[in-house]
Image (cartoon, rainbow, N blue to C red):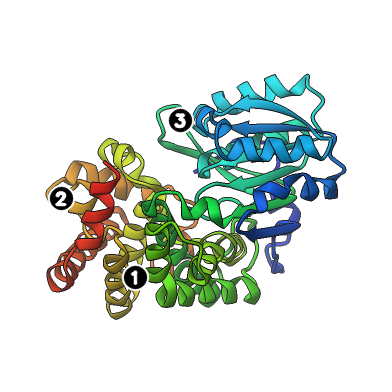
């Protein structure tokens, strides 16, 4: 995974290899609740905003974006719209940065899914203004972090950018989440579940480092553990709430787990092989074209857990099956016989910079073996408890 901009946290925080500090990163404010989009003007007053760039898709401009724009205008803030076209690529980022550079905006509000909010962070960095993140899905843990994952225009993972500041504000309207597809919330659970298992690896490995090149904090690991605990206890209830378009306490808790606990946990707790495998699945067209990031992370998490603890891998696989996440290769439109595709995944995983956080040496062959073992575990779990939730979500999304 390559870096593509001039800011890197490692020379700042980890310049002394013998005395690597612990570092915790977090947004300045996190605001979550039913209806909070209607108060965006109040929140932006914290930033003394007078003219705000708004990164939002065409569809979003007619829905959630319109609510944000109304709130800003009612507070005397001038919105400047820049229409997001769907991909967090350098081409798209530079297009919006060029458009907004002459508009004298003093902050950027990114409204949408994971790629939109990641693109928003990149654009705000180029403009030298604070970024406000308004996720309309709880499908990933990107909103709170000071980094963005980049993709090619075709959607293949291509690199990462780091930023000196986390978002100034993260505003999550659970009413919006409750009216989105259940599959997105469930995908967010797949992304979030990896947080604890990757942070645990990093905490236990004295040589492991986080995305800032530093040691993980106990606080981040504790958030990761609470994230997993919340998912296990309330994930199914939250999914049922979204299926009924209702905001419940369980939904509030899972949205916070998917977004805040996972976001803080991964960035300051550390990554391992689970996300390396997930990012590598984007290089397989049939997976990239049909599956969400969190669904790929779910498969990556099972593969990592097979390397560590088959008992824990089964526990997680059962949870994934119960909420509708993929647990075997067939549920990513692959099979154990697709060796050319699996070789691509295994080879690309070796390029992921954080697989060294694992306590064992990895090779393409060992990664491939673990992918197959996780697949076989998933087949056994599906045979035992069924795949009703998975089929319901995926039939509903087609």
Where residue 52 appears, as percent x and y from the top left, is 76, 33
Q: Are marks 3 and 1 in contact (CB under 8 Å)?
A: no
Foreground: 110 or 348? 110
Q: Is residue 164 above or below residue 273?
A: above
Q: Residue at x 65, y 46 (%)?
A: 133
Judged from the image, the secondary structure of the residue bearing numbered disc 1 is helix
Position of 237 compared to 100: left or right? left
Q: Residue at x 68, y 62 (%)?
A: 17
Q: Which residue is mark 2?
A: 335
Classify mark 2: residues with Cα within 10 Å, few (<14), some (14-19) or many (20+): some
Q: Which residue is mark 3?
A: 152
Q: Is residue 198 above or below residue 36?
A: below
Judged from the image, the secondary structure of the residue bearing numbered disc 2 is loop
Q: CA distance from mark 3 to mark 2?
A: 26 Å
Whichever of labels 3 and 1 marks the residue nearer the N terminus, that label is: 3
Foreground: 234 or 242? 242
Q: Is residue 266 above or below residue 385?
A: above
* Disc marking residue 305: 1
């Amino acid at each position: 995974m390559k870096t593509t901009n001039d800011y890197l946290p490692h020379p700042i925080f980890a310049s002394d290899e013998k005395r690597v500090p612990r570092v915790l990163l977090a947004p300045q404010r996190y605001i979550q609740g039913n209806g909070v989009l209607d108060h965006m003007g109040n929140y932006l007053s914290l930033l003394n905003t007078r003219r705000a760039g708004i990164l939002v898709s065409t569809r979003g401009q007619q829905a959630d974006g319109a609510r944000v724009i109304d709130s800003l205008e009612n507070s005397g803030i001038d919105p400047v719209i820049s229409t997001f076209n769907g991909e967090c690529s350098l081409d798209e980022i530079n297009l919006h940065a060029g458009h907004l550079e002459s508009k004298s905006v003093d902050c950027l509000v990114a409204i949408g899914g994971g790629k939109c909010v990641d693109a928003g962070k990149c654009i705000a960095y180029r403009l030298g203004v604070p970024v406000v993140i308004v996720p309309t899905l709880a499908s990933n843990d990107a909103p709170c972090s000071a980094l963005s994952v980049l993709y090619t225009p075709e959607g293949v993972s291509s690199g990462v950018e780091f930023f000196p500041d986390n978002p100034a504000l993260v505003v999550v309207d659970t009413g919006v989440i409750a009216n989105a597809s259940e599959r997105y919330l469930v995908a967010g659970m797949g992304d979030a579940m990896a947080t604890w298992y990757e942070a645990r690896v990093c905490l236990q490995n004295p040589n492991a480092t986080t995305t800032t090149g530093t040691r993980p904090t106990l606080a981040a690991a504790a958030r990761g553990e609470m994230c997993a605990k919340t998912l296990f206890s309330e994930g199914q209830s939250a999914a049922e709430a979204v299926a009924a378009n209702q905001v419940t306490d369980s939904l509030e808790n899972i949205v916070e787990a998917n977004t805040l606990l996972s976001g803080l946990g991964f960035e300051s707790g550390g990554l391992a092989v689970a996300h390396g495998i997930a990012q590598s699945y984007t290089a397989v067209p049939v997976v990239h074209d049909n599956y969400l990031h969190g669904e790929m992370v779910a498969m990556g998490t099972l593969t990592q857990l097979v390397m560590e603890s088959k008992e824990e891998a089964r526990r997680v696989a059962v949870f994934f099956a119960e909420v509708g996440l993929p647990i075997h290769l067939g549920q990513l439109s692959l099979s154990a016989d697709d060796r050319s595709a699996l070789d691509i995944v295994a080879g690309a995983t070796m390029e992921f910079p954080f697989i060294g956080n694992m306590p064992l040496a990895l090779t393409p062959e060992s990664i491939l073996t673990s992918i197959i073992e996780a697949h076989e575990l998933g087949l056994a779990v599906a045979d035992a408890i069924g795949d009703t939730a998975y089929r319901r979500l995926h039939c509903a999304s087609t």
